[in-house]
Amino acid sequence: MPDEASPATAPAPETATSARPRRRGPRLSRRALLLALTAGAARAAAASPATAGTRPRRTTVLAPPVGRVDELLARLTLDEKVSLVHGAPDSASLGQAGHVPGVPRLGIPPLRLADGPAGIRVRRTATALPAPVMLAAAFDPGLARAYGRVIGREGRALGQDVLLAPMANLIRTPYAGRNFETFSEDPLLTADLVAEEIRGIQAEGLVATVKHFALNNQERDRTTVDVRAGEQTLHETELRAFEAAVAAGAGAVMAAYNKVDGVHAAENATLLTGILRDRWGFDGWVMSDWDAVHTTGPALAAGLDMEMPGGSHYGDALRTAVRAGRIDEATVDRSVRRILSVRERFGLLDAPPSRPARDAASGARLALRVAVAGATLLRNERGALPLTDRAARSLAVLGPTASVPFVGGGGSAHVVPDAAPSPLDAIRARAGEDGSVAYAVGEDLFGRPLPPLSPAVDLEGVDVAAGATWTRTVTLTATDPDEWTFLVHYSGPRPTVTLDGTELFPVGQGVAEYFVGGLLGRAPDGLDVRRATRRLAAGPHELTVTARGGPAGQLFRLRAVTAATRAADLAEAVRVARAAHSVVLFAYEDATEGQDRVTLALPGHQEALIEAVTAANARTTVVLNTSSAVTMPWRERTAAVLQMYYPGQEGAAATTAVLFGDADPGGRLTQTFPAAEDRHPTAGDPRRYPGEGGVEEYGEGVHVGHRWYEAEGVIPLFPFGHGLSYTTFRYEDLTVAPGAAEGLDVTFTVRNTGRRDGVEVAQVYVGPSPDLTALGVDQPRSALAGYRRLELAAGARRRVTVHVTARTLSSWDTARHGWLLGTGRRTVRVGSSSADPGLSLGVEVRPS
């Protein structure tokens, strides 16, 4: 019989009643219940596929009786209304991203908004979860809901009301700096996971904000770039996850920085009203990304309800425009009503709102579960992993991120974890007393003390008292021409350091000052770090250091890395590798909001380190803590490659469990890894990325990610869906039958043919419709249509049915401005990746 234990894709939206967020404390008012029921009806209508060739119908519901929101709106003054549609400073800030003051006169409490794609970003500790891209690698919507519940509970416990997550933008280019904050290059998988995470977040009473609406798929020029995507491309790729978020009941949407078709997203009526509200029936509120508003009247009219984090356009300017008659106060009322309605739905008009207790132990367990489930084994030659017998007893562990755990990326995703052990300590504990685990850093990230200076001064640790200023001018002598990387570590105001009269560490402009990475921006002892690389000629150089104590005093140090220290580190790593039976080498790539990557190669001198170590010991496993795809010219010299992304606070335990075989690597790639810099969908075409003349075109159309590789016949380094297990699987007995609502039911058997228990992710792909091809509709040669994560004992088999929906079988018809079912004979394929031939059958798709 077909296995119905878990859904092939995201579960259907909950009923209106069950979708209402679960609150702790006072029960929902009758008004809130009516709003929730109304919202659920609209979402259910929006979630239903449109009839072929027609626009989706808007659901008409009777307005509920006058209730609390209406009463409040009638009593609010214009000044109070304006105060509710923009952010302001928080006198009791918890370090969150945003704050909207309340209206004490009417009992409306303030609203606090926190970043949180991988955990709550405030000054206090929180569960640092694996990055969303690692969650996605599990191909498990149920796990996404559990992930959301941890964030939702912690957000409420830590004094927050709104979560600025999840991110639903697709991974379109491997260079994008925030690829780790989102899920996948595939529209279906991203939609499923986004919807389930939102359901989890909001079940705990925290408002979820899906972002960045829309086409914010890069950080470079993100505030100015004008993105052009055709109507079909937009609906079939980028918008699918946002539509799923609306169907899941998301309370808020964040408008993106970029322009879409020449109009900033925060004042784009086509997006904010035409698509979001009129087509999908969204009933929440729309906020801007931080400082992404450029106008007052046009933005408000387009459907932007809230400006964040301040009120440059929705503060005095809005109040003045209303009083002068340039903006109708009813337009302001519309936005205030949307905001208050969502707040009532979530119990956020109660003062003070109820707060659950934080459950750190439960969060840690979920973090470990996700990290193991998303661990993706890319290569495993001759059974190099798991580490057993002599390989487990004689180990060399190399790399800076073996001793300094890489928890998460930089920018909005930064979380202060309760604790984060190092992989080195976890590996040593697992190897036990009988094991030998040697360590070498391989490449120093945080610098060594400077060589002797003249006059002599120790810059390794200088305490500057509060209010004091410390300054010295010394001579640094370089014995040979060399490349120096200088590092300043500091706890207070940034010290000023000049080398031969040139400032080494100038304060960056805008986000560049704050978004410097999740690993490299902070030393292991918590001091902030900045770097500068200079080529020095042999001889003396003047170094001047000035540091201010500020209001609280500070500690700083000045360090450097030179060719000589790098050579010594490399030699030590090779020596340690040669002396051990097996090697585990940790490599990293540090991504952050605010900047894109400039190369797909590992940064620094890591490639040279891997080449030298694999030459010394062929039994080398490389563990990658990277945000996205990297090129691997060194791959063939390794024994194994394990992709661990940014694994959160339990990354050390998860990595160790997979390395030693205590757990099967459960992850599969949600993005294609290209073989080279010039062999991916945005390579060689600046119009596609990063744009030309301020304009970027999505010239790949519907062929995003793995679809492009198949359409172009380009062989990747690793395909979408790829991932190895410690056992083997076989697919058998594929059948396809008509399913409910013009869909298909794809049924097959998966057999574990190995001697270990293991995890498989079965993937269903569908070929193009000949009838749509005849109409000139562009289609992928192969599109992901469904999937199922399976855990099978050794020798076990399972019969599985994956339902393929009519939406997945449909294409966007630009002539009808709606979805059109792809009828005719189509190929259905089942396998372990987008490149696996697997099993295939032809099936006739007909309208019901």
Image (cartoon, grey):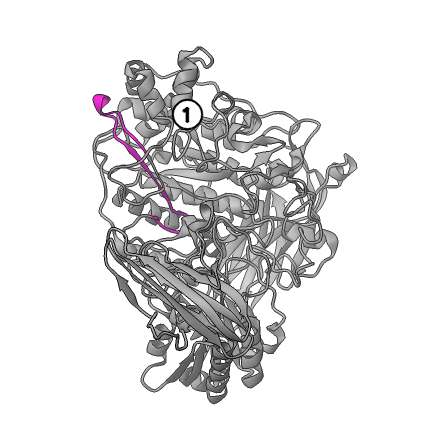
Q: Amino acid at mark 1?
A: Tyr
Question: Depth check: 489 or 140 in front?
Answer: 489
Q: Establish if 476 lies above or below 801.
A: below
Image quarter in which the C terminus is found: top right
Left or right, residue 618 beside residue 248: right
Is residue 144 among what the camera can see?
no
Q: Residues within 10 Å of mark 1 (few under 14, many from 20)?
A: many
Question: Depth check: 755 or 54 in front?
Answer: 54
Left or right, residue 74 beside residue 394: left
| Secondary structure beneath label 1 | loop
Whether residue 277 is in magenta: the answer is no
Q: Establish if 428 lies above or below 378.
A: below
State which quadrant residue 260 falls in: top right
Count of picture labels: 1
Q: Residue at x 58, y 77 (%)?
A: 611
Q: Residue at x 27, y 57 (%)?
A: 361
Q: Residue furthest right?
A: 774
State which quadrant residue 724 falls in: bottom right
Q: Residue at x 45, y 36 (%)?
A: 291
Q: Residue furthest bottom?
A: 579
Question: Depth check: 277 or 405 in front?
Answer: 405
Residue 228 position, x and y percent, is 65, 37
Residue 835 position, x and y percent, is 66, 59
Looking at the rendering, the stretch of residues picked out in magenta corresponds to 100-121
Residue 719 position, x and y percent, is 62, 60
Residue 233 position, x and y percent, is 65, 38
Whether residue 105 is in magenta: the answer is yes
- Mark 1 lies on residue: 314
Left or right, residue 490 beside residue 243: left
Q: Residue furthest top?
A: 325
Is residue 44 among what the camera can see?
yes
State which quadrant residue 803 falls in: top right
